[in-house]
Amino acid sequence: MNSSISSEQVDKKKLRKVIAASSVGTLIEWYDFYIFGSLSVVIATKFFPSDNPTAAFLSTLATFAAGFVVRPFGALFFGRLGDLIGRKYTFMVTLLIMGFSTFAIGLIPGYETIGFLAPLLVLILRLLQGLALGGEYGGAATYVAEHSEPGKRGYRTAWIQTTASLGLFISLLVILATKKSMSAEAFANFGWRIPFLISIVMVGISYFIRKNMDESPMFEKAKQEGKIVANPLKESFGKKLNFKFVLLALFGATMGQGVVWYTGQFYALSFLQKVANIEFEQSNYIIAASLAGGTGFFIFFGWLSDKIGRKAVMLTGMLLAICTYRPIYQAMYEAADVSLKTEVAGSKVIHTDYFMIPNSVDLKKTVKTEFSYTDGSKLTLEESSLTTIFPGKNPKKPEVKRIVHVGSFSFWFLILLVFIQVLYVTMVYGPIAAFLVEMFPTAIRYTSMSLPYHIGNGIFGGLLPAVATYLAAKASTANEVAVAAGQTIPYDKPYLEGLWYPIIIGGVCFVIGLLYVNGKDKEIND
Amino acid sequence: MNGIRQIFGIVWILLGLAAGYFLVFEQSLKLFEKGGMDNIVPAIIYTFILAPLLTGGMCVFGVYASQNEYKRVD
């Protein structure tokens, strides 16, 4: 069968516009989705007071539901619309929903002003964000792929693939810039709303760019030929012929891609901060630098997949990831482990601060003990204790925080280690839009590709931080129990145990992909 | 190669069942017992979304594989 768009027919200028319009809109949607996560601590204090169980419940729902449950529903709902009324109108609707939800979050008065209505509204808007994101990606990827000439589909759709990382990167930059432009107090009072509010400007611009674009030529052709199906959901999931490929896309590609993506971009940050105890700002710089260095490789691997095949590129990335995660994370742990460094003689410095908690009888005492090391690293042990000025009351148990500031060599070494993981992300994620688009026929493409993508990423990937943390905590507890009982510890390196989740899921996905995925199917005109 | 694809179908069915058992009996029940919203919400998601998805999805995939639905004429 001949493809409907040949290389000669493609208007390069128009194609660049199509890619730019689609990518900018998708980037804004990712930005909108991430700022909620990046500002979750501030949002929690404003809308979800932890001492109130109902508000805390709504907070947990907002975290879980938007990330895991709603995205696949958005994929189904908007995928169906996209296969019925067209790609262009559907992904414009998702853009508007996302933009207005984000903007509205920035306007909601806090819990102190309007009570339960505040967390409830935030939850509803967060769910709308999840729905919109579920519908956006499939539309943008399908739209670009259906405009592209054969032989360059991987390269063209790879631009869409850069947007998830860039969206995260830009959200971090906007938040850091807003924080730097005002005092910490001003940011906590109203400044945190600015990243939400400016979203409406970006969405407005993107909307007008997209508005002037044409519908996908393949969808138009299918419409003219009367090939639009009346019920895309039934067609995609009710017929074995299509459903078997939905399952294959999920278990043979997006499931592994999702865990590699989340390990490289989110678990790496969590590991640096919570396990290696690297200070907040430095750990964010490590991630930001690795993302900045790695993002271009989405394009490269998308291009490479046009030359040597999607399957080869994606499975190589998956295999490299599952084989090297443990040594990489061991090296990350050691780079921040001060027990392996040489302490500068006489470097120990102790600072003590006292702070009276306003409107209470409690006094906060903070003792900071600093140690310096020959490679430029610093360790701060911060012991905070709360005590009452009334005699006779027992002081509360002190909390000890361990903060590591790594020296220059370790800093760059950590960037390299995270960069390697970002490279794996680009290998599995760069070609996946083209791969999914090529798996399904035009009439059900939007619906069929969106669901496995969002289950793979939202559920298998989204659960990674919770499952990995659980596995690592379980190993630590088992070690503590063994030590208390005078037995040999069962886990030599409990901090690496969380990695079994991406390794096992990625391993299963690799075997399924290797056995069942057809690396030769690049036809989309069906 | 098609024969291997077919035989592995059984592996995917067993894996789906094992994943469902692990999620419900090793994870969700313990979380329900612990109580508290932080534990109950993930337990509900594991029991009613993840477990059916993994078990159902992998089993159907395994059945299709064992029926040689993914055979290729290379």
Image: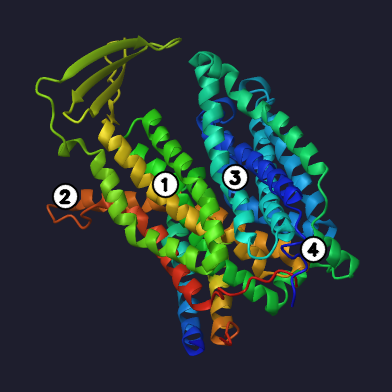
Callout 4 secondary element: helix
Please give the chain letter of the residue carrying mark 1: A
What number is the disc on residue A218? Answer: 4
Which residue carries the number 3 mark? A163
Instruction: State the residue at coordinates (24%, 52%).
Output: A493
Confirm whether circles 3 and 2 share one chain: yes
x then y, percent, for residue A415:
36, 40
Give A5 or A356, whichever is nearer the viewer.
A5
Instruction: State the residue at coordinates (68%, 79%).
Output: A240
Q: Distance of mark 2 from mark 1, alpha carbons? A: 28 Å
Q: Nearer the viewer, mark 3 or mark 4?
A: 4
Q: Is residue A493 left or right of residue A466?
A: left
- Say which label, 1 or 4, has the lower sequence index: 4
Q: Distance of mark 1 from mark 3, alpha carbons? A: 19 Å
Q: Distance of mark 3 from mark 4, alpha carbons? A: 24 Å
Q: Quadrant of residue A193?
A: top right
- Say which label, 3 or 2, has the lower sequence index: 3
- Say which label, 1 or 3, has the lower sequence index: 3
Asked if the residues shown at circle 2 and circle 4 are in contact, with their CB atoms under 8 angstroms apart, the answer is no
